[in-house]
Image (tube, coloured by chain):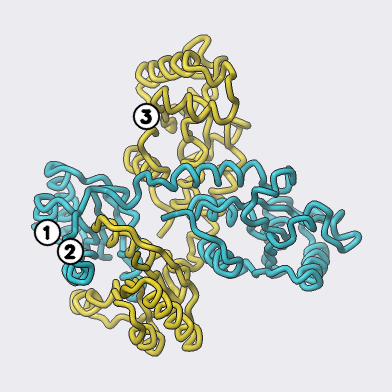
Chain colours: A yellow, B cyan
Amino acid sequence: MRTAFYISDGTALTSEAFGHAMLSLFPMKFKHRTLPFIDSAEKATRCCQQINAAASEDGEKPLIFHTFVNTEIKHIINQSQGISYDFLDHYVEPMEAELGIKAQPKTNRTHGIHQDYNFRIDAVNYTLDNDDGVSTKEYGQADIILIGASRTGKTPTCLYLALQYGIKAANYPITEDDLDNLQLSYDLKMHRHKLFGLTIDVERLQSIRQERRANSRYASLEQCQLEINQIEHLFRQEAIPFLNSTHASVEELAAKIMDEAKLERHRY
Amino acid sequence: MRTAFYISDGTALTSEAFGHAMLSLFPMKFKHRTLPFIDSAEKATRCCQQINAAASEDGEKPLIFHTFVNTEIKHIINQSQGISYDFLDHYVEPMEAELGIKAQPKTNRTHGIHQDYNFRIDAVNYTLDNDDGVSTKEYGQADIILIGASRTGKTPTCLYLALQYGIKAANYPITEDDLDNLQLSYDLKMHRHKLFGLTIDVERLQSIRQERRANSRYASLEQCQLEINQIEHLFRQEAIPFLNSTHASVEELAAKIMDEAKLERHRY
């Protein structure tokens, strides 16, 4: 199996994103190695040794996804036995021509601390303080409030919204108490323009709940079915937008919610 | 100000990562618009209208960062008044030649649900269950345990480790009780090979604590100084690796911890 290297003078998150997008086009398996914070000739030389060792071991040339501002480091990496794919190379010149200014590359600028940074940390703190319906007092500050049955993916989605986009995302689990009268509680009604629902296929919900509390009423197919039916009915009755989380990753759920609820990114 | 569009048939996370990396090379400001889930000719046509509207409003051609598997959608987007930068285009052919197979593009493959997915959600649940020292019983399952004074960035870093890399990251705040005898507690000693420290500049810590509990002893410069001195002393005495979070984003802290603690990614 061939090895793919993701190399950067910073976190390597962009190299990983680019490399994964490229490799996903090919129906092959790869070994993956990320080498972040390669910011000196010495470290670059050690990278080369790792790349060359992988080349010998695999009997195939490793693929290298990188971009380096520092030409000395780039030169060292390019002398390894791997095949380099520099994901900015091709675009710098045409973009310089279009923008009418020269590129001024700086080291590790992509994932450092920007102005928006405190905003994101505040959003994470908000989301943790307003997880799982523990409190509804701060819903006035929420950008969005996810609601749905227990174990439909509300918490991870909220955390992703906070970390990736700086969104203050509260979440509220709809329980049997709420379902008794099939209405939104007063606290939720007050903020109904911020509500967004999550639902899930009943079989999937049962299997997740079974892992948490095996053989409980909570994890029974009957109970899951009842809750999902009633909650989806509530979403429709109250015209609350909702998504099914069964086949969606947190990235997809978060991006869809951003899009459908027209939330503004605080991440740039 | 020129507008940058990030467009995709999926989450647009990769388009954003690529576009941000490109634009960070240029000392200019841009407006940013993300248009995810553009998976039909109709939606692509609406994108074009938005791009053309931005062109008129800005008086300058928008920049478009995208990649599309569907050639019809790509064609529609490329007919807008924006300048398209397709971040995979240049690389597909050389990579096909190197790998000896044809690319088989599939829609939205990058950020969907992979095998690793449950692993990441499990890691998020673990991290929440083991946040802020609430319990030390499950430290046996931890991949890493972050320790440090209150408000040094442990929780957001743990959540990022869990969401991005599928790492089970517990965290434990070192408090005055722990500092009294300047030793690691028994629970931490038991897992000392998993410990990783976070510290922070005293002035920064004071300002963060001041926002949480204004004018408390907890937020006093004296108290912050005392805690940081003693905790850094403890890290050195016990040979616990540690990082200073003052000028680092959660992405950087997480990537550095992955690297220094040689943690294995569960994300591919």
Pick the quarter of the image with the N terminus of chain B. bottom left
Residue B162 lies, in percent from the top left, at: 54, 51
Task: Locate residue B93: give its quadrant.
Answer: bottom left
Instruction: Name the residue type under label 1.
Output: Asn
Secondary structure category for the residue under label 1: helix
Which part of the image, by quadrant, shows the C terminus of chain B?
bottom left
Answer with mark 2 or mark 1, whichever residue precedes in sequence.
1
The front one of B76 and B124 is: B124
User: Residue, x 47% and y 51% (percent of image)?
Assistant: A166
Residue name at image x 24 percent, y 57 percent: A25
In depth, the one of A52 and A231 nearer the eye is: A52
Classify residue B233 as left or right of residue B115: right
How far apart, in angstroms, are the residues tagged by discs 2 and 1?
6 Å
Q: For this view, does B65 lie left or right of residue A235?
A: left
Name the residue: 48% across, 23% down.
A189
* Residue that label 3 marks: A242
The amino acid on which the numbered mark 2 sits, given as a three-letter code, is Ser
Disc 2 designates what residue? B84
Subunit ID for the residue under disc 3: A
- Tag 2 near tag 3, CB within 8 Å: no
Give me the C-alpha separation between circle 2 and circle 3. 33 Å
Count residues near mark 2 (Cα–Cα under 10 Å), then give few for <14, some for 14-19, many for 20+.
some
What amino acid type should be assigned to the residue bearing mark 3?
Phe
Q: Which residue is mark 1?
A: B78
| Label 1 CA crowd tier, 10 Å (few <14, some 14–19, many 20+) | some
Cβ atoms at labels 2 and 1 below 8 Å apart: yes
Q: Is residue B128 visible?
A: yes
